[in-house]
Image (spheres, rainbow, N blue to C red):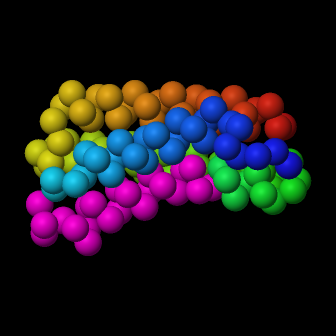
Amino acid sequence: MQNFRSLKVWEKSHQLTLDIYRATKDFPKSELYGMVSQLRRASSSIASNIAEGCGRGTDPDFKRMLQIANGSASETDYQIILCRDLGYIEKNMSDALEAQILEIKRMLGGLINKLK
């Protein structure tokens, strides 16, 4: 299988996670074990599942892990909407993060289709 670091979708997923860590650093302390934890875990799961899929050794396994990464991207997308609606992040920040997620989901979809 290939090195996950060579995949653009992994690179973009990693950058999204870094951006989410920065965006959540000033959330209310009461959300440290709630929203902050959930959002950080969901976003890091995208890149983690891509990396794990690359290490699995077969295309069907890789495809399955990409599908799981896509699910994590959808979860992250919802968490961003919720954070915006709760007033934890500004609309311009949520728009930027949602644009990143949309691009990642499109890339994942293309890669999944390529493996069919």
Residue furthest bottom as drawn: 33
Indicate left or right for 11 with 54 as reference: left
Residue 2 vs residue 65, the one in the foreground: 2
Q: Which residues are magenta?
A: 28-49
Whether residue 10 sits left or right of residue 44 in the image: it is: right
- Evaluate whether residue 63 shows in this view: no
Residue at image coords 27%, 60%? 36
Front residue (pair 61, 54): 54
In this rendering, the answer to whether 42 lies above or below 111 is below
What residue is drawn where x is 18% and y is 65%?
Answer: 31
Q: Position of residue 10 (x, y in %)?
A: 61, 41
Report if residue 54 is visible in the image. yes
Q: Is residue 114 left or right of residue 35?
A: right
Q: Where's residue 11, x and y in %?
A: 57, 38
Say if the magenta span includes residue 46: yes
Q: Quadrant of residue 111?
A: top right
